[in-house]
Amino acid sequence: MNKAVFFDRDGVLNELINRNGGYYSPRNLSEFRICKDSIEVTKFTKSKGYLNIVVSNQPDIERGYLIKSDLDKMTKILFDKLILDDVLYCLHDENMCDCRKPLPGLIYSAKSDWDIDLTKSLMVGDTEKDLGTARNAGVKFYLLNNIYNINIKTENRIKELQSILAIL
């Protein structure tokens, strides 16, 4: 069986957009920027034998704020710049399908597709939904610290994405 690092996308691998006083996913290609540490981190985790899998809610598709072709171009940039094995999205809005985080459907899908041992895997995210997903899937979770998630209670908080290098 394989082990994996499950990465949330927005706020972890790519930058969030400050819009209307909050932090949000990019809605067009011109807003999409890879976080500086993402390249080094995905190279390192891959060198340690982990699969690198992105699991991300992308409800702006259903909401009409993001077109699928732009999401596809963003995904291509992720694959071109980072060392990734798979990218899995939930494109649904707030209706709780089994793939929308905090439910574990995306992780379970990756587990099945890639023969992953979840007890040897971990997730890095930046929101309460990411924490819930990891808990629901039985995966160890690391919260990437940011101003917008200061109130989330978790035992594993990392200051920057590169902090994961010392953990593995």
Image: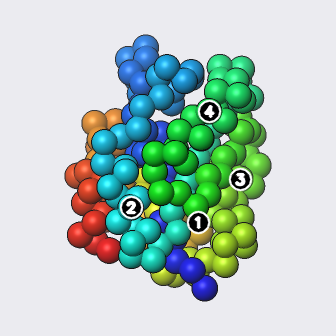
Residue that numbered label 2 is attached to: 43
- Mark 2 and mark 1 in contact? Answer it, CB < 8 Å: no
Name the residue: 67% across, 72% down: 114
Which numbered mark, 2 or 1, is in the foreground of this view?
2
In terms of sequence position, does the residue under pointer 2 or pointer 1 come before the other? 2
Give the SS element for disc 3: loop
The relative height of residue 30 versus residue 155 in the rendered view (above or below) is above
Which numbered mark, 1 or 3, is in the foreground of this view?
3
- Mark 4 and mark 2 in contact? Answer it, CB < 8 Å: no
Give the SS element for disc 1: helix
Q: Left or right: 156 with respect to 64?
A: left
| Residue 73, numbered circle | 4
Residue 150: image quadrant is top left
In terms of sequence position, does the residue under pointer 1 or pointer 4 come before the other? 4
Q: CA distance from mark 1 to mark 4?
A: 30 Å
Residue extending farthest to the front is: 80
Q: Left or right: 95 with respect to 160?
A: right
Which numbered mark, 1 or 4, is in the foreground of this view?
4
- Mark 2 and mark 3 in contact? Answer it, CB < 8 Å: no
- Looking at the rendered image, the quarter that the N terminus falls into is bottom right
**Amino acid type for the residue under numbered disc 1:** Asn
Q: CA distance from mark 3 to mark 4?
A: 22 Å
Q: Left or right: 27 with respect to 89?
A: left
Which numbered mark, 3 or 4, is in the foreground of this view?
4
**Amino acid type for the residue under numbered disc 3:** Cys
The relative height of residue 100 versus residue 64 in the rendered view (above or below) is below
